[in-house]
Image: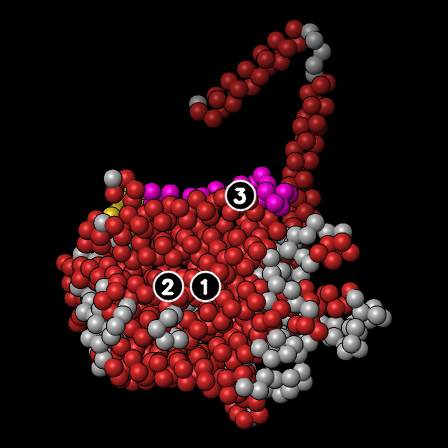
Amino acid sequence: MSDTVLNLAWLVPLPTLLAFAIIFTITEKNKRLSSSIALVGVVLAWILCWAVAFTAFSDPEVTVVHPFDVTIPYLPTGMATLSMGVMVDGVTAVMLFMVGIVLTMIFIYSTGYMTFPGHLVQKLNLDGLDPLYSRFFGYISLFATGMLGLVVADNLLMLFIFWEIMGLCSYLLIGFWYNKVYPNPKQITPPKAGLKAFLTTRVGDVLFMMGLIFLYILAGTMNFQEIFNPEMLHHLAEQTLTLPIFGEVSWVVLISILIFWGAIGKSAQFPLHVWLPDAMEGPTPVSALIHAATMVSAGVYLIVRMWPLFNAFDHGANGAVLFVSIIGAFTALFAATIAVAQNDIKKVLAYSTISQLGYMFAALGIGAWIAAVFHLIMHAFFKALLFLGSGSVIHGVEHGHHHVHEHSHDGHGHDEHGHHEEEHFDAQDMMNMGGLRKRMPITAWTFIIGGAALSGFPIITAGFWSKDEILAEAWYLGHRTIFWVLALAALLTAFYTFRQIFLTFFGKPRTEAAAHAPESVKAMTIPLIVLAVFAIVAGWVGIPEDFPALGGILNNPWHHFIGEQAHVYELHAEAPPFNISPVLISIVVALGGIFLAWLIYGRKPLQAGDTDPLARWLGSIHKVLRNKYYFDELYHTIAVRPVLWLAKVAFWFDRTVIDAIVNAVGRFGRWAASFSRRILDEYIIDGAVNGTGLVASATGSVLRLIQTGQIQQYLLVMLLAVLIVLAAVEILFF
């Protein structure tokens, strides 16, 4: 029975793929039908995901200890035959559990988000839906297909195919509102943001693909189970090459680092982090897809999946693992410092995502494999909640802005109270919000729950248990530098998250748009409520067994389930013993960050026109943080401008040198053709042909005189000719 249900893994990506195909080939002109088909597709995928996941949960022996793996031959290469198939193990099961429900909530939410305010519908004679409504649901259906296919893939080639499908969809969806313009010419537009994301992630993907090629050359396979075989890992670890500076290096280390570069690009880690904040130019459901259910989670999933390979050389004590931990810890702190100075509600969450992903990579780098997977799943729930909540806020503020303008007395943007609203109003700027807790209570309280989970609010939130486990592992394994870097990042996380909450939901509205913001429709608020429940209760499955008072209630089913798989792959699976020190530090940094945010932004909420106190206190440092350490400008100087300069040089060389050579060859060809026509053709060829004709004509004229038609004359001529010939022979030879 278990094998029968697990075989459904083959069907997991199919419903959303069919929805994509149907929308773009049949129903695109019918917007409501298109969204309905997308919803049916994702719900069917959710049912399949949970059927497979709960089968795995109920019978760990079938999937965790002996992963379910079914393949079919796909591509003979001469060296070996590549196969395509599905694999279900513990990591697959928990990912399917998370991806299925989060995707469904995002799709339901999207049906409400991609609409226009009612008064605009009447004024502009619209149908109430975005003009590209059907296209949007087609794109997100394909996006969902990419993640679902990636999760169930049993080999790297299949994983890479779905990986690139998501890359394409992110490009299409980030630039979805391609006709959007801004008054500030320096502000990036959606098409440019999509292109930036696509090109930046391609850097990582090229290195990732190089790693796959090297791995296939050495291993002769891309199947996970075959690669993770202890004999194969030992064989790969023994293969070495000599590199300049580094000397002799194991192929395992080099391949692992190349694969990790793919994750650096996809999960927006330093130094390829610059694309993710600008990805906020896409519709907010897309942001939730990228940051929670798909795209960036795929980068962490890749390293989790390939961790036995990373761990193969010297039991993980190698340069690849060190590289992962350094990049992860640095990115966690680096992105958190930037987030504290952002005013765009979505960009705060974007840098938060970069930071939290750094947490996961740092956990992997120190060997806390189980903790990394735990935080990956928990983070998806509360980060999806936060992004969808931010979209609800933006939607409400935009509607409030339109309402104010529709009801202004003079029709020129002056509201009922005489205040002036800017023509180009930024509905994502938290300085334009405030007081939304009363206007949008469901959105506010679910957002606060998500923010508490992200901040690691003690005991009751999922984020506390997943983040605390990473800190506990770092403390237990002796990685104190990593521990303190992550603890400082956690402090900043709690601070910027509640700074966001206080600026958005507390105090009085700082604009008329915020004062008139309505609560979102049920299609948007119900997914928020569902995800808020998961942001609290999901983390309880990972409460350590020896945690005071709470440890014996659920007996930590998470660690038992995933820990079995860690044992199979010979990874660190020992749960750290309870230690009060990291727990107290975790609680202090979480509550300390929240308290600090309350002191600055909650105790005395900002009023309209007030300057951010943090900007006053930090001065030029705040400007550096707000401008993201000027990395965009740096990359523009060292990468974009040189490429543009090189393109201009190449264009000049092409136009001046290459075109000149080609044109000269053309002119020479025309001269040669003219010479050939005038000299060779007209005088020599035509002369020879014409001369031959003249000779033939003259000969004919002479011969025509002797053509009398009398046979006697012809016989006489023949007789004379014979006599002449005989006479010539007599003279010459006798």
Query: Along the polypeptide, which appears first: circle 2 or circle 3?
Result: 3
Query: Along the polypeptide, which appears first: circle 1 or circle 3?
Result: 3
Which of discs 1 and 3 lies nearer the camera? The answer is 1
Left or right placement of residue 425 versus residue 314 in this view: right
Q: Which residues are magenta?
A: 8-34
SS at mark 2? helix
Please tell me the numbered disc located at residue 37. Answer: 3
Amino acid found under the numbered disc labelled 3:
Ile
Is residue 193 something one can see in this rendering? no
Crowding near the residue tagged with mark 1, few <14, some 14–19, many ≥20 C-alpha atoms within 10 Å: many
Which of discs 2 and 3 lies nearer the camera? The answer is 2
Would residue 27 be counted in the magenta stretch? Answer: yes
Would residue 132 be counted in the magenta stretch? Answer: no
SS at mark 3? helix
Q: Which residue is mark 2?
A: 537
Q: How is the image coloured?
A: secondary structure
Query: Along the polypeptide, which appears first: circle 2 or circle 1?
Result: 1
Identified at 50% across, 88% down, the residue is 599
Check whether the beta carbons of the residues at disc 2 and disc 1 lie within 8 A of each other: no
Amino acid found under the numbered disc labelled 2:
Val
Please tell me the numbered disc located at residue 532. Answer: 1
Check whether the beta carbons of the residues at disc 2 and disc 3 lie within 8 A of each other: no
Q: Nearer the viewer, residue 144 or 659?
A: 144
